[in-house]
Structure formats: C-alpha cells, structure tokens
Amino acid sequence: MTPTGTTRKDTPRTSGTVLVIGGTGKTGRRTVARLRELGVETRSASRSGDVRFDWEDRATWQAALDGVEAVYIVPLDTSPSPTPAFVEQAVAAGVRRLVLLSARGVDVPGYFGSSYDDGGPHLEGETAVRSSGAAWTILRPGWFAQNFSEGVFLDGVRAGELALPTGDGRAAFVDADDIAAVAAAALTEDGHEGEVYELSGPRALGIDDVLDEIAKVTGARAAYVQLEESAFRAGLVAQGMPEEEAALWTAAMKPIRTSQEALVTDGVPRALGRPPRDIADFARDAAAEGVWD
C-alpha cells in the first residue's frame, strides 16, 4: 500500500525512454535491470555503458539525452558539481522527470567534516533539480551495505581484517537493491514528485555486527580493527591515494563513528510500501554470488 492507502499500479506511468547516468555503478546497474524487468525502454549511460557518457566531457551529454523522458542522475562527487549544467541541458532537451541520487546528511553542517560544510556537490545537485521546472525526486541514502561486497570494505573482509576509524559507531546500512527499487518507482510511477526520500536499512549495526552477519553465511569471520583517523589516513596515502582524497575518505567515516548513520528512516516504506531489506538478506545474497570466496 502507498502512504495514502491506495495500491500503486504495476504498469509504469513513464512511456518514454529512461536514461540512467552511472548505469554500470552500484545503484545504476540495479536500476537499469529493474526498469528493463518492468518493460521500460532504458538507456544505460557511463564511460563503459550502452551509451557513452562522461561527466567531464560535455560533448557526450546530448547524444545520451536525445529522446529521453526521464533521467536517473548518479552525480560526479566533485566541486563545483557539473550536475546543474547537466540538469539545464536535460530540461532543454525535453526531459520531464529527474531522480537524483544525493546523500544522507547533505543538509547537516559538518556531517562529512569541514570539507562539506556547504553541502558539497550533492547539495548543488539538489538545488538544481528542485529549480529545474521538471518533476523531481531526491534520494538520500546512507552508507551502502554493498560497500562490504563490492566497495571500499571488500578487500578487508576478504583478507580477514577490516581496519577502520569507525570506533563503536553504528549505521543503518541500506541495500543498494532498495535504492534501485525506489529510483525505478520514482522514474515510472505517479506520487513521487517533490519527495525527498531518506533511505536506510531497518536496523543500526556496528562494523562487528555486519561482520557477524557475513560470517553466518560464509563461515569465515573477518576481524574488526579500530584505527585512529590519523593512522587510517596515513595508510591510504601509503597505498598511493592523494592526501586530499585520503582526507575526504577519512572524513566520510565520521557519520558511522559518531552513529549519525544509525537513525532508521522511513524512505523505503514511504516509497515502496514495504520494509527495507535487512543486512542479513544482503549477506545471504552476496554470499550466494561468491563475492567473499
């Protein structure tokens, strides 16, 4: 059921082509798959997608937008953001619906450290879609569960030791499949216009708790090692990461360490009429795919 008590129709409302920017990424490829399952004409765009799209090469934008009715925007996380210019071009090309992947905490000063006190590129993107004149929906997910299976935590889990500056903090990790489901709904159904969906999982867990869930389905338990921020940042630099990027990654861990990511939100139930997927569901499916073998 929807929040208004009416059942959403199974038939998508969007009848034209949907463009998915970042169509080969964590949420993008899942959104592409879900839209195609619904029978929606879907264009996957990225530097290696069906259609070439490069945020840093504006000459690639127009071909991706030609004939498109709706767009799922996975933005480039740089400042100044190219999203406002893309939104302007998309609307000029006839796009009528925009769904933006933003981030939890973009409107909270200091959430990701001082570098994002002004909201950073995500807030620039939000401002652009809100003022675009097109129907818009904004998704604000927290930390992805998939960071343990195809992201920054994967190597540590596989190696048997995950070392992070997150202390005893907790997070309501959200499944990227839920993000994709909300994106597909917002792209194809009525009732999502003007909504900001804060997306989380159904419960808050510490890093140790997530490793416990993974161990239940793999039989192998990675150890969690708590690092000081300075040691974590130095380790990234020693691996070849530039100082500035290492500082940003370290700051990004702050919402977990401080348990700001622990709040369970209502975005998934409001958008889909069902609870979000649990971390145990994520771990079971990821193990079945052999990601930790």
Image: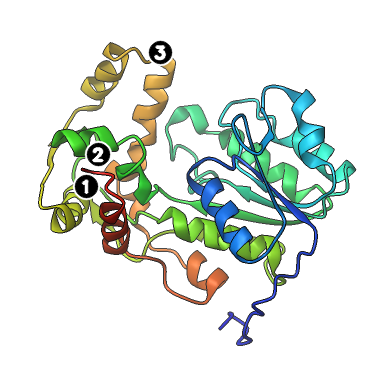
Asked if the residue under mark 1 is in contact with the one under mark 3, i.e. CB atoms within 8 Å, the reply is no
**Number of numbered labels in the structure image:** 3
Q: Nearer the viewer, mark 1 or mark 2?
A: 1
Residue at 37 percent of width and 30 percent of height: 251
For badge 3, the amino acid type reads Pro
For badge 1, the amino acid type reads Ile
Does 135 appear above or below 255?
below
Q: Badge 1: few (under 14), some or many (20 or more) residues near its Cα, within 10 Å?
A: many
Q: Position of residue 175 (x, y in %)?
A: 40, 56
Residue at 53 percent of width and 52 percent of height: 140
For badge 2, the amino acid type reads Thr
Residue farthest to the bottom, as pictured: 5
Dot label at residue 242: 3
Decide if residue 199 is in sight here: no
Indicate the quadrant where residue 186 lies. Answer: bottom right
Asked if the residue under mark 3 is in contact with the one under mark 2, i.e. CB atoms within 8 Å, the reply is no
Residue at 69 percent of width and 30 percent of height: 82
Residue to which mark 1 is pinned: 207
Q: Position of residue 23 (x, y in %)?
A: 59, 43
19 horizontally vs 264: left or right: right
Asked if the residue under mark 2 is in contact with the one under mark 1, i.e. CB atoms within 8 Å, the reply is yes
Dot label at residue 166: 2
